[in-house]
Image: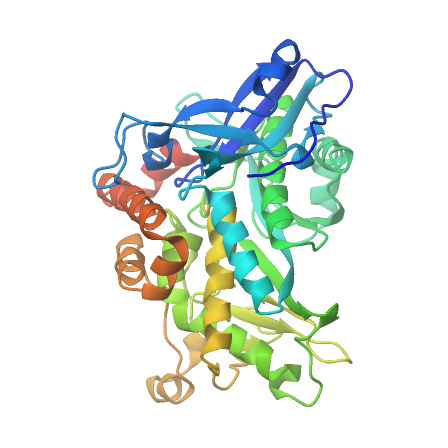
Amino acid sequence: MNQNPVYLPEGTKLTRLVWVDNANVARAKAFHTASLARFAHAGVGIAAAQMALPAQFDTIAPESGLTPAGEIRLIPDWSTCVALPHAKGHARVLGDMCQANSVWPLCPRGFLRGVITKAKQLGLKFQTAFETEFYWVLKTPDENIVPLMHSVFATSLTLDTLRPAIDDLVDSLVGQGLPVELVHGECGPGQIEVSLHHTDPLTAADRMVALRETAHAIGLKHGYATTFLPKPFLHAAGSGAHLHLSLWRDGRNILPNPEGLGGLSPEGLSFIAGILNHLPALCAVLNPATNSYRRLVPSSWSGSHGIWGFENRETAVRVLGSPQGSTHFELKTPDCSANPYLAMGAILSAGLDGLERNLHPGQPVNCDPATLSPAERELLGVRPLPSSLLQAIEAFSKNSVLLNAMGPALAKAFLAVRQSEWNHMREFTHEDEVKLLLTRY
């Protein structure tokens, strides 16, 4: 359990205690400052079955191992508490799920902390950052959506058209202490990408939650619906949550080696190989919505093949170069329907397995793999990732490394939620998915 001292920003009336469940729905209970003494250390109670709720409704997923009986405590991690510039008098603090004065095995933040601890035992630390894409859209009276504008990648017109909302978003993020690096229009109509500065994995996941919550709030202020759905428009660009990552030991980035393959060290190559080896199963965590697989298609810069390349935006892992070697890499596959704590923890677990087993990723692919002949794909080991949530669930359920990393209780509930969503939405049209999930993430 965290033992950080209580910190509440001046002028706070309500403090939102936030958690993210297995369906990647960010939820909150708010307590009044007059009740601070009651909740500061004891937290608030929530049903244990909260971690068995799928995205489509608040009903416990079958075979989750959780029932209506049982309660856990959501304990504030006061190191994450910030005032919300876009909601005067409100603060947000992230919570850790605890039971009997210990971190509950199904706590997503607890899972990620456990993976970080394992890495530290191996002498490793990480620097990570999400590169997050989303849409601001308009809703019609019949619950459909229409674009705010029509443009192409990175035009000044996008920044000018959406400037009031973008300015409010950046001001609020910076006011919360989030270091905004880049903001630009993406390829889709009304699509925005926000890049935050790199940090440790837990903080990067916390920042993803803050960014999502803030973008929704700013959208409401300007009359927009905010959607992190991977594919809100069938014939426009999908939205990803690309993860940038580097490996560190003794205060030194150990990823680069100018003499190595792709400018990478042996450790870097093995870490990437672990991710690629487990990527079909990782898709259940990184792309957990039925809608995810409308984005994860060839020739769409989504990383739909389990391969790597040097500055290749079609490969799942894109290695970025510099004169000193490759200082970090980008995993392009994830999207924002993923719980950021589970996604980060699963990715790191896969990479650590690659290190422990001294895996090698094979030769880099430096073209669009969709243009290769079957013989060329076989030679280079090019394989497509799952084309449906069901395929990803099946891969995850057989993957002992990821199952063991999560632990039996969390893995059981996670798979139950995924299966419930597949059972409910497998026959959905794209329009059905958008109407149900538009603002869920």
Identify the residue at horizontal 59%, vertical 84% (top origin): 266
In this view, 50 is above or below 333: above
Which residue is at the far front? 100
User: In the drawing, does residue 203 fall left or right of residue 227?
Assistant: right
In this view, 203 is above or below 198: above
User: In the drawing, does residue 83 fall left or right of residue 336?
Assistant: right
Viewer-nearest residue: 162 or 418: 418
User: In the drawing, does residue 88 fall left or right of residue 100?
Assistant: right
* Color style of the picture: rainbow
In this view, 420 is above or below 50: below
Instruction: Count the numbered circles shown.
Output: 0
- Residue 15 in picture, x, y percent from top left: 62, 20
In the picture, residue 50 is in which quadrant?
A: top left
In this view, 150 is above or below 18: below
Identify the residue at horizontal 31%, vertical 64% (top origin): 399
- Residue 100 in picture, x, y percent from top left: 43, 33
In the picture, residue 209 is in which quadrant?
A: top right
Identify the residue at horizontal 33%, vertical 50% (top origin): 411
Residue 52 seen from this side: yes
Identify the residue at horizontal 44%, vertical 54% (top origin): 286
Viewer-nearest residue: 280 or 294: 280
Viewer-nearest residue: 31 or 283: 31
Residue 273 seen from this side: no
- Residue 39 in picture, x, y percent from top left: 57, 19
Instruction: Look at the image and tell me in which quarter the N terminus lies.
Output: top right
